[in-house]
Image (cartoon, rainbow, N blue to C red):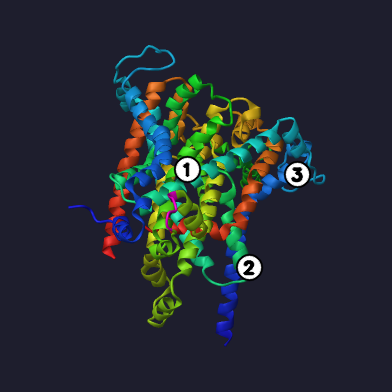
């Protein structure tokens, strides 16, 4: 039995009333061909390429390569990769949780009318316009012991000099915090738009029924914007998993590999000439992403069915 | 009566505090970069940290970064690349979105889902085969080489959003406006595109920003400074040592990179947000 689909239903209706010649399947294929070709070339072909080479020992040293599963065996023992996977997970979870909580609170806060509210909304959106690269550069400079403002403020308040980016746990915290800084405002404004779509009657009715602020937020407002929230979580998890720009500039994955997000590690492996090892890492990263996404989708469709 | 008034003032007070905190946390890093970019070099590098342009505002840093580092060329490169890529993706994904949304053909859903699923493919995976291909085609170190790469990564999202938009156009609109004997491209450009003007604008903007900010391909596929984009030039300027950051030039360069995007974001904030929220409709 064919899976029924909104798009399918629309099309069967269209076919009977519009000129047939215009909507032949051939036309459809021509229309989608350019992007499908480009996407296969830049997306799926590389994936297959990496899959193939991950089973060889191709590297700068071994230009004449042969079949070898050493890459995958090395994977289990490599401490750098272990640190990478740990930090990637920590980063993804903390970043998504932080951004979700703060942006929801912010959106709720901005939902009330007060003087200058619109200006604040625009201000809050600004960090998104700052490229992740620039965020990384400003962040990195702010930790500089001579002219950085974070080092300076820390010195003034606590009279301590601290090498933020040289210690793994503080470096990790800072990476997560700066990444959050950049994206919170963006999602807050989007959630705000969603919150403003909630009809006033609903809120008034629940107030009359005696709902407290907490109940209003968790039981009424949140469920009504759940599509946006779930979309946000999906995209945030996906992008933080594959993030590269900020980490590369801020810490370069250091100290050691403690802030090396997966893409950064693969980048370093590739630049060091261990091509097939990098390919193996790409394959593993891709598999992780699929697993993550599947869990996410199952969770989302379950939540949607509950309502 | 007094109780109510006290509550009101307390509430206003708390709001003001929260707003202040938001303003400071959000704006301070940007402000600091701006003020540093306008401060003379000798003041920046002599401790302690400067929080405003001591010694007067000077544009020397901007002059230095634009001329001696060739940053102006990078700016032009970024602009041309972003406009080109964004234009190409917007047009191509618009066409494809119409095909996915209105026309039925074998494997359509499979292909559509594969396009969207390709967002899972990490950017770094594209690098390796492209390295070999580019070597053979001598496409290295040219800004043009980056076009197909940047187009590739922005395709899935644009196609997805536009397909949603087109699906929401009532077919009565099309049926009423269609002329006998028109071919598909005429139909698209004359009937559908004007309806989607705003959506197309938003997609163009989002792709522009994404290409402008793109780093990984920019630093790997272009080596010489004159062909680099803004983002690549900034990364190269940063170097490896945290104690030796050329903050005078970096801050000026950063401001040059983010100011156009800030202007665009402020001008088109409403459209951007609506473009994003529509993507959450499944």
Q: Nearer the viewer, mark 1 or mark 3?
A: 1
Say whether disc 1 or disc 3 marks the residue closer to the N-terminus: 3
**Residue sitting nearer the eye, B72 or A86:** B72
Q: How far apart, in angstroms, are the residues tagged by discs 2 and 3?
A: 28 Å
Residue nearest the viewer, comparing A46 with B49:
A46
Q: Which residues are magenta?
A: B180-184
At which x and y percent is residue B78? 62, 38
**Which residue in the structure is indicated by mark 2?**
A116
Q: Residue furthest left?
A: A1
Q: Is residue A225 above or below residue B134?
A: below
Horizontal side, residue B133 vs residue A121: left or right: left
Same subunit: marks 1 and 3:
yes
Mark 1 belongs to chain: B
Find numbered disc 3 in the image and state the secondary structure of the residue it sits on: loop
Q: Where the C terminus of chain B falls, by quadrant?
A: bottom left
Query: Which residue in the protein does label 3 denote?
Result: B38
Confirm whether the magenta stretch covers residue B194: no
Which chain does tag 3 point to? B
Residue wearing tag 1: B154
């Amino acid at each position: 039995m064919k899976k029924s689909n909104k798009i399918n239903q629309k099309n069967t209706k269209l076919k009977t009333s519009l000129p047939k010649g215009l909507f032949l399947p051939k036309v459809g294929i021509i229309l989608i061909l350019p992007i499908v070709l480009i996407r296969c070339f830049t997306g799926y072909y590389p994936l297959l390429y990496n899959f193939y080479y991950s089973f060889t020992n191709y590297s700068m040293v071994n230009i004449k390569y042969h079949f070898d599963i050493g890459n995958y065996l090395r994977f289990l023992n490599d401490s750098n990769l272990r640190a990478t996977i740990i930090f990637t997970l920590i980063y993804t979870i903390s970043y998504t949780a932080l951004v979700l909580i703060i942006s929801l609170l912010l959106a709720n806060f901005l939902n009330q009318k007060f003087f200058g509210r619109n200006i604040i909304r625009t201000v809050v959106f600004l960090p998104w316009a700052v490229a992740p690269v620039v965020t990384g550069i400003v962040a990195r400079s702010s930790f500089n012991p001579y002219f950085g403002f974070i080092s300076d403020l820390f010195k003034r308040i606590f009279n301590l000099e601290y090498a933020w980016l040289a210690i793994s746990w503080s470096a990790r915290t800072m990476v997560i915090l700066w990444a959050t800084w950049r994206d919170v405002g963006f999602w807050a404004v989007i959630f705000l738009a969603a919150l403003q779509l909630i009809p006033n009657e609903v809120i008034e009715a629940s107030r009359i029924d005696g709902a407290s602020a907490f109940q209003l937020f968790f039981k009424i407002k949140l469920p009504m914007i759940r599509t946006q929230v779930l979309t946000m979580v999906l995209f945030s998890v996906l992008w933080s998993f594959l993030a590269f720009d900020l980490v590369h500039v801020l810490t370069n994955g250091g100290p050691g590999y403690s802030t090396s997000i997966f893409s950064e590690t693969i980048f370093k492996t590739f630049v060091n000439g261990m091509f097939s090892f990098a390919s193996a890492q790409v394959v593993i990263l891709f598999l992780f992403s699929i697993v993550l996404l599947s869990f996410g989708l199952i969770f989302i469709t379950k939540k949607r069915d509950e309502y | 009566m007094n109780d109510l008034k006290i509550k009101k003032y307390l509430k206003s007070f708390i709001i003001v505090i929260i707003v202040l905190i938001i303003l400071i946390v959000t704006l301070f890093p940007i402000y600091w970069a701006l003020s540093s970019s306008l401060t003379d070099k000798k003041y920046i590098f002599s401790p302690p940290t400067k929080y405003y342009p001591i010694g007067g505002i000077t544009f020397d840093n901007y002059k230095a970064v634009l001329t001696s580092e060739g940053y102006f060329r990078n700016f032009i490169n970024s602009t041309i690349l972003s406009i080109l890529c964004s234009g190409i993706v917007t047009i191509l994904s618009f066409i494809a979105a119409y095909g996915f949304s209105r026309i039925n053909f074998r494997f359509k859903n499979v292909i559509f889902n594969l396009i969207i699923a390709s967002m899972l493919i990490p950017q770094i995976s594209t690098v390796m085969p492209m390295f070999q291909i580019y070597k053979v085609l001598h496409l290295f170190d040219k800004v043009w080489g980056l076009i197909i790469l940047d187009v590739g990564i922005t395709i899935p999202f644009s196609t997805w959003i536009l397909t949603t938009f087109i699906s929401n156009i009532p077919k009565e609109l099309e049926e009423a406006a269609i002329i006998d004997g028109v071919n598909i491209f005429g139909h698209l450009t004359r009937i559908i595109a004007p309806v989607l003007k705003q959506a197309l604008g938003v997609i163009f903007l989002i792709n522009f920003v994404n290409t402008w900010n793109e780093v990984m391909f920019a630093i790997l596929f272009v080596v010489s400074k004159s062909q680099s984009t803004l983002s690549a030039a900034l990364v190269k300027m940063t170097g490896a040592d945290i104690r030796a950051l050329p903050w005078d030039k970096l801050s000026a360069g950063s401001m040059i990179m983010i100011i156009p995007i800030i202007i665009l974001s402020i001008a088109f904030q409403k459209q951007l947000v609506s473009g994003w929220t529509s993507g959450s409709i499944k």
